[in-house]
Amino acid sequence: MLRISKLTDYATLLMTRLAREPGRCFSATQLADALGVPLPTVAKLLKRLLQAELLVSVRGTGGGYMLAHAPRAISVADVVSAIEGPVALTECVHVPGGCVLEAACATRANWHVISRAVRTALEGVSLADMALPRLRTVPLQRMAVKEK
């Protein structure tokens, strides 16, 4: 089963919460309470999202964390990459030469196509989309894999 990690799921939830009020600063405690996620986990996620430059921190009274970019400019792929690294379904897609079977692998090229399709789908959904009560329908043409 392909599945994102629990941390990535929580990070997406956290970023979606921030996207609902993009100009507002939230403390780590406020986010933990609002999401029902333990404070140490929220702190860990905030650190990674700051390092990825998806968030900014504001010091002082009324400070906290807020989105570094407009919700429309941050994709789910950005959040996934900040927590898990590049979107790649197999080792050979992620690290060329990382698999001993790579040179003779009959499926390697297809895994590249599949990874690109997943990445394209994640790039096609923004935090603004995630903040909607129900995700809009994405036409399949938008998900067409483009050769790079």
Image (spheres, grey):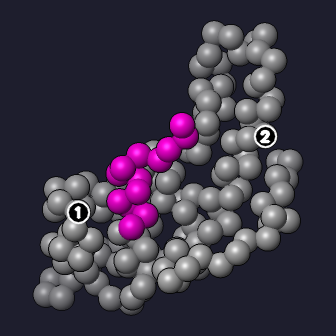
Q: Is residue 120 left or right of residue 43?
A: right
Q: Residue at x 81, y 64 (%)?
A: 140
| Magenta stretch, overall SS | helix
The boundaries of the magenta stretch are 1-13
Q: Residue at x 33, y 88 (%)?
A: 24
The image quadrant that residue 100 belongs to is top right
Which quadrant does the N terminus fall into? top right
Verify whether residue 12 appears in magenta. yes
Q: Residue at x 57, y 67 (%)?
A: 75
Which disc is residue 37 wearing? 1
Q: Residue at x 39, y 88 (%)?
A: 21
Which disc is residue 116 wearing? none
Residue sitting nearer the eye, 3 or 24: 3
The image quadrant that residue 46 belongs to is bottom left
Q: Is residue 57 visible?
A: yes
Question: Helix, strand or loop at disc 2?
Answer: helix
Q: Is residue 27 visible?
A: no
Query: Residue tagged by mark 2?
Result: 113
Residue sitting nearer the eye, 125 or 100: 125
Among numbered discs 1 and 2, the one appearing first in the sequence = 1
For badge 2, the amino acid type reads: Val
Which one is closest to the eye, mark 1 or mark 2? 1
Residue 33's spot in the image, x, y percent? Answer: 18, 74
Task: Work out whether 144 lies above or below 68.
Answer: above
Residue 146's spot in the image, x, y percent? Answer: 85, 53
For badge 1, the amino acid type reads: Val
How packed mark 1 is, by other alpha carbons closer than 10 Å (few <14, some 14-19, many 20 or more), is some
